[in-house]
Amino acid sequence: MNPAMPMKTAYFAPSALLPDGWASAVRMEVDTFGRLSRVEAGASADGAVRLPGPVVPGMPNLHSHAFQRALIGRTQVAGPGEDSFWTWRKAMYASLDRLGPDEVAAVAGWLAVELLEGGFTGIAEFHYVHHQPDGTPYANPAELGQRTLSALRSAGLSVAMLPVLYAHSGFGGQAPVPGQRRFLNDVEGVLRIVEAIRDHAAGDPGVRVGLAPHSLRAVTPDELRAAVAGLLANAPIHVHIAEQQKEVEDCIAWSGAPPVRWLLDHAPVDGRWCLVHATHVRPDEVEGMAAAGCIAGLCPTTEADLGDGIFPAVDFVRMGGRLGVGTDSHVGRSAAAELRLLEYGQRLRDQRRARVLPPGERHTGAALWRAAAAGGAQALGLDTGRLSVGAAADLVALDADHPALIGLDGDALLDAVVLGQGDGAVDTVVARGAVVVEGGRHREREARLEAFRDAMARLG
């Protein structure tokens, strides 16, 4: 499963974004576990692999449903009535019947190529397709999770694998609907899958295994408590929350409180939790999320595609809240594009510029990259998102000759990449010390593309 671990090596960057700012002539040495063992500015390039341009930390992708990469272009036709998240969900359910283990692996394998080429070096896989099309578990109940993990990891991505607990169709333990039969588990069943995936990945420093209670719609309070209690103390916990207005209204009708408020009041939300979307929140919920230290998991291209709404990121960041970005259904697969839409959504709503900025920051694109790299690393529970000793050697080298970057340096480079349409500026990606992307292309691009093409032909 694991990509080949690097021999002890060194990389040299003309400049690099370190925790305390940009530095020149940076030598980064990597140990045999793919971690940075030395980071030195003003250093010699002797014996090091020379990277082609400025280097920034690789971006963790904190929310993915890998199988949904197969749906792009298949769920965009307007229906006879009002299109919404809920009509999209029906189309997604209907697409699942021909998706088997080989197709799952091929789709995830190609997705990993696209994400690495887009500047992502880690991923949190919110994995909820567990069973055969008729709802019967596979002989190995963790079959699809293990195949997905192997496909993502072997391409070079670090992975936080999050098997999903999905038990009900609505608040208060409502009976599931037929379209959800491939997702369903009880607490004991999903914890067995968690354990099986943990065994599958044993010894790989690039994997963390946690859990995703799908949503307050899909689990009861007792199931949520039991599932969280069954995890290791440092396991990440991710949950969909308050994505749609109807979800908020239904939660209030059930409990008397909106979803984020209910969760903060009834669950041990802290820094290992990631609240995904949280689109429709009240000011007290925004303040509560920031105080709890959890991560706001935002997926701007998917949230735009599904008509979800806009999370109040400006207020959240000013309260000290931490955030990261993911690609969710993968209608977008670029780290810069997710950050761009995050910022531009806030600008369109507020009719102002430079919105998602912590106090004292001035470069919006650079501040977003730093914040999302740190927040994403926390959400994944992995040692990434920073270029310092002990962190994973996850490096993104920009193309110094890219037209969007000409004449720029320092934070202005990231402003150009994130906000100046600098797509295609990623030249080289080093994932846990191993080069996986060169010249903007993944080393296994052709083989994985062919497998993806074959899988899509079978899906019809």
Image (spheres, grey):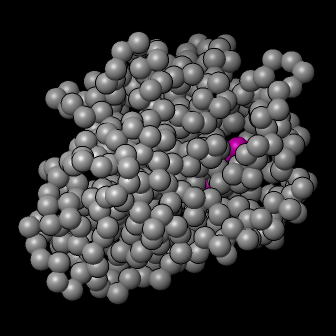
Q: What residue lies at 73% left-to-right and 45% top-to-bottom?
A: 72
At 78% from the left and 69% from the top, the residue drawn is: 102
For image coordinates 40% across by 66% down, the residue present is: 428
SS assignment for the magenta stretch, majority: strand
Horizontal arrangement in the rendering, residue 9 relative to residue 417 (left or right): left
| Magenta stretch: includes residue 209 | no
| Residue 459 appears in the rendering | yes
User: In the figure, residue 387 lies in which quadrant?
Assistant: bottom left
Residue range in magenta is 162-166
In the image, 341 versus 233, the foreground residue is 341
Residue 118's place in the image compared with 14, above or below, is above
Between 165 and 112, which is closer to the camera in this rendering? Answer: 112
Q: Please, is residue 106 above or below residue 218 in the view? A: below
* Relative vertical location of residue 107 with respect to residue 38 in this rendering, above or below: above
Give coordinates of residue 39: x percent, y percent: 17, 68
Quadrant of the image occupied by residue 453? bottom right
Quarter holding the N terminus is bottom right
Front residue of 346 and 423: 423
Residue 96 shown left or right of residue 155 in the figure: right
Q: To which quarter of the image does residue 355 belong?
A: top left
